[in-house]
């Protein structure tokens, strides 16, 4: 495997674990606010991010590339209101999309089709992640300032269940 692509994927593993930390911190915020549905949403989101890290980990392992784990940064964000984590999540998903695109560009430049095939799944996934984050912001703007609306929105978020990714490496 190309050294630059391997390095970028190695870095991505650590960034995905950071994403899990960030989303667990959002879940913690919502738990403290008494919004168990939003807590549930972000706990599941954290599990997805850990699985993304493990998919990259397994891909490197399958290609005989050693994985290097780095320290995971503490999530830093200012707790203001129930909208803040939602906006921060959208910002973060856009950042992750840029990281995936950078890895894809590096693989494309050297015609690493196998890595590009792996990344195709992540490109699609990031589109879904950004849409979900946008949808949550829209719903919070519409219903979040009304107690009954927030209750219903929280109930909707509580209905999310975890589904492991079905990507074959």
Image (cartoon, rainbow, N blue to C red):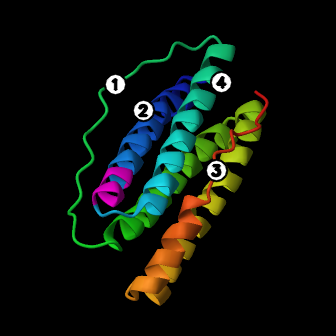
- Asked if marks 3 and 1 touch (Cβ < 8 Å), the reply is no
Name the foreground residue: 4 vs 138.
138
Q: Residues within 10 Å of mark 4 (few under 14, many from 20)?
A: some
Residue 169 in view (yes/no): yes
Name the foreground residue: 132 vs 64.
132
Residue 63 in view (yes/no): no
Disc with the residue nearer the chain's start (2 vs 4) = 2
Disc with the residue nearer the chain's start (2 vs 1) = 2
**Residue shown at 48% from the left, 84% from the top:** 149
Where's residue 10, x and y in %? Answer: 49, 27
Q: Which residue is mark 3?
A: 161
Where's residue 119, x and y in %? Answer: 68, 42
Mark in the foreground, 3 or 1: 3
Q: Residues within 10 Å of mark 2 (few under 14, many from 20)?
A: many
Residue 2 inside the magenta-drawn segment: no
* Residues rendered magenta in the picture: 27-32
Name the secondary structure under disc 2: helix
Main secondary structure found in the magenta portion:
helix
Disc with the residue nearer the chain's start (4 vs 3) = 4
Q: Which residue is mark 2?
A: 14
Where's residue 45, x and y in %? Answer: 52, 49
Name the secondary structure under disc 3: loop
Lateral position of residue 121 relative to residue 22, left or right: right
Q: Residues within 10 Å of mark 1 (few under 14, many from 20)?
A: few
Tell me the distance, in whole angstroms, between the alpha carbons under discs 3 and 2.
Answer: 25 Å
Q: Quadrant of residue 63?
A: top right
Name the secondary structure under disc 1: loop
Tell me the distance, in whole angstroms, between the alpha carbons under discs 2 and 4.
Answer: 14 Å
Q: Which residue is mark 4?
A: 59
Q: Which residue is mark 1?
A: 70
Mark in the foreground, 4 or 3: 3
Disc with the residue nearer the chain's start (3 vs 2) = 2
């Amino acid at each position: 495997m190309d050294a630059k692509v391997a390095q970028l994927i190695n870095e991505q593993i650590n960034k995905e674990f950071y994403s899990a930390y960030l989303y667990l911190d959002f879940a913690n915020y919502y738990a403290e606010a008494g919004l168990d549905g939003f807590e549930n949403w972000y706990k599941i989101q954290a599990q997805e991010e850990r699985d993304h890290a493990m998919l990259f980990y397994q891909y490197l392992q399958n290609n005989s590339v050693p994985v290097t784990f780095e320290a995971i940064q503490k999530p830093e964000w200012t707790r203001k209101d129930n909208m803040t984590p939602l906006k921060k999540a959208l910002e973060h998903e856009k950042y992750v999309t840029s990281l995936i695109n950078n890895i894809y560009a590096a693989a494309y430049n050297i015609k690493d089709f196998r890595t590009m095939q792996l990344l195709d799944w992540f490109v699609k996934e990031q589109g879904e992640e950004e849409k979900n984050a946008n949808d949550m912001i829209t719903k919070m703007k519409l219903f979040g300032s009304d107690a009954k609306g927030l209750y219903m929105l929280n109930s909707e978020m509580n209905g999310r269940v975890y589904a492991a990714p079905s990507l074959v490496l």
